[in-house]
């Protein structure tokens, strides 16, 4: 484990060294380009950090972000890499840029190419402000996906375990209903009621008048089509003639003439002749008796 960590640390250190040397080479060309488009000594010194520095920032953002934000960071990285490559290429083609003896604002002999190069060189700092701010905002607002770990032969999210609470259910569990027990007063002895309250006939007790409740029958509206229930009328039934026992036996003999003995069962006869189980058993016994077999 320690060797693995040391190997990774050495790889990262070597990468930092290579990137630093590459930045030093590119810094010389970009500084001369910045001086050619009108930047002073301080601005020309900081100009390479604007271009190549945003490339490093876009690379780090691409490693952190995901989805569309990662695609945006990769596009920024590709655009500024191409821009830095073009400016380094121009610096190599124009020897006058090395000694800063070129005319101010003159990067190419052909006017359209010169205008395009000057526009590219002057727009890179403004683009660094815009794209750099956007990338930093995306990184700060980015929420990484929860890391899944295996717990008890199942994968469960650490973020889910950390944020789990009792309110995660879609419907809250109802509280148990506690019965409200009310203690009723004990009844008074019947003898005291007879001595203190005079007896009245049941007809003499006045009942409070209760207004009748008006019931209104409302038809329930249903959009579903009801299926027919009850017996099917005789007219709607398919006419099917009833066969006599003799006709059934004749049909069974014809259908089972070439059947082997083991196939002569009630179920097979019922399916072949299309009759009831009771008739099929009767036909089976008759046919087995005609063949001289034992009746099951």
Image (tube, rainbow, N blue to C red):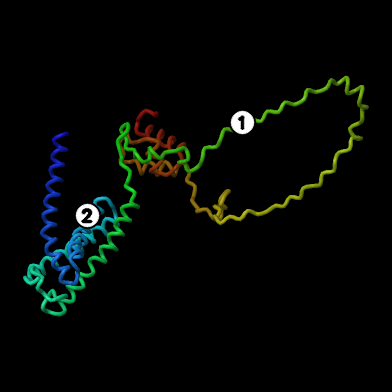
Q: Residue at left 44%, top 38%?
A: 165
- Residue 97 image offset from top left, x and y in percent: 10, 70
Q: Quadrant of residue 192?
A: top right
Residue 261 visible in this rendered orientation of the protein:
no
Q: Is residue 23 left or right of residue 235?
A: left
Secondary structure of the residue carrying tag 2 is: helix
**Residue 181 position by quadrant:** top right
Q: Judge left or right: residue 54 versus residue 200.
A: left
Residue 178, numbered circle: 1
Residue at the front extreme of this rendering:
41
Residue 284 pos. (x, y %)? 40, 35
Residue 111 occupies quadrant? bottom left
Nearer to us in this view, 99 or 211: 99
Quarter holding the C terminus? top left
In the rendered structure, are the residues bearing label 1 and label 2 in contact, judged by CB atoms less than 8 Å apart? no
Q: Which mark is residue 59?
A: 2
Residue 158 got which mark? Answer: none
Q: Is residue 24 visible?
A: yes
Density class for disc 1 (Cα within 10 Å; few <14, some 14-19, many ≥20) is: few
Neighbourhood count class around disc 2 (C-alpha, 10 Å): few under 14, some 14–19, many 20 upward: some
- In the rendered image, the quadrant that contains the N terminus is top left
Name the residue at 78% across, 23% down: 186
Name the side, left or right, on which 159 lies relative to 14: right
Residue at x-position 28% and y-position 52%: 65
Task: Give the residue at the far bottom of this rendering.
Answer: 111
Q: Position of residue 131 (x, y in %)?
A: 28, 61
Q: Given this view, does label 1 or label 2 mark the residue nearer the observer?
A: 2
Question: In this view of the protein, which residue sits in the foreground, 242 or 122?
Answer: 122
As helix, strand or loop, the secondary structure at mark 1 comes to loop
Q: Is residue 106 above or below residue 253?
A: below
Sequence-earlier tag: 1 or 2: 2
């Amino acid at each position: 484990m320690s060797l693995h960590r040391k190997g990774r640390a050495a790889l990262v250190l070597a990468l930092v060294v290579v990137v630093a040397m590459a930045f030093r080479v590119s810094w010389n060309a970009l500084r001369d380009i910045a001086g050619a488009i009108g930047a002073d000594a301080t601005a020309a010194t900081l100009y390479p950090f604007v271009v190549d520095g945003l490339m490093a920032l876009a690379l780090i953002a691409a490693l952190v972000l995901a989805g569309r934000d990662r695609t945006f960071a990769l596009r920024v990285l590709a655009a500024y890499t191409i821009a830095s490559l073009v400016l380094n290429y121009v610096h190599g083609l124009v020897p006058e840029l090395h000694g800063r003896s070129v005319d101010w604002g003159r990067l190419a002999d052909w006017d359209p190419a010169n205008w395009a190069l000057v526009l590219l060189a002057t727009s890179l700092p403004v683009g660094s402000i815009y794209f750099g701010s956007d990338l930093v905002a995306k990184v700060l607002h980015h929420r990484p996906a929860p890391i899944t770990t295996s717990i008890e032969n199942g994968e469960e999210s650490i973020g889910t375990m950390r944020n789990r609470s009792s309110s995660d259910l879609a419907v809250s569990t109802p509280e148990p209903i506690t019965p409200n027990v009310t203690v009723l007063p004990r009844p008074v002895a019947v003898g005291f009621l007879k001595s203190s309250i005079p007896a009245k006939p049941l007809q003499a007790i006045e009942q409070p008048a209760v207004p009748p409740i008006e019931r209104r029958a409302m038809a329930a509206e249903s959009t579903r089509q009801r299926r027919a229930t009850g017996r099917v009328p005789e007219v709607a039934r398919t006419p099917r003639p009833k066969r006599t026992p003799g006709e059934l036996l004749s049909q069974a003999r014809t259908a089972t003439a070439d059947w082997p003995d083991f196939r002569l069962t009630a179920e097979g006869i019922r399916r072949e002749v299309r009759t009831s189980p009771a008739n099929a058993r009767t036909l089976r016994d008759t046919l087995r008796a005609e063949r001289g077999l034992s009746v099951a």
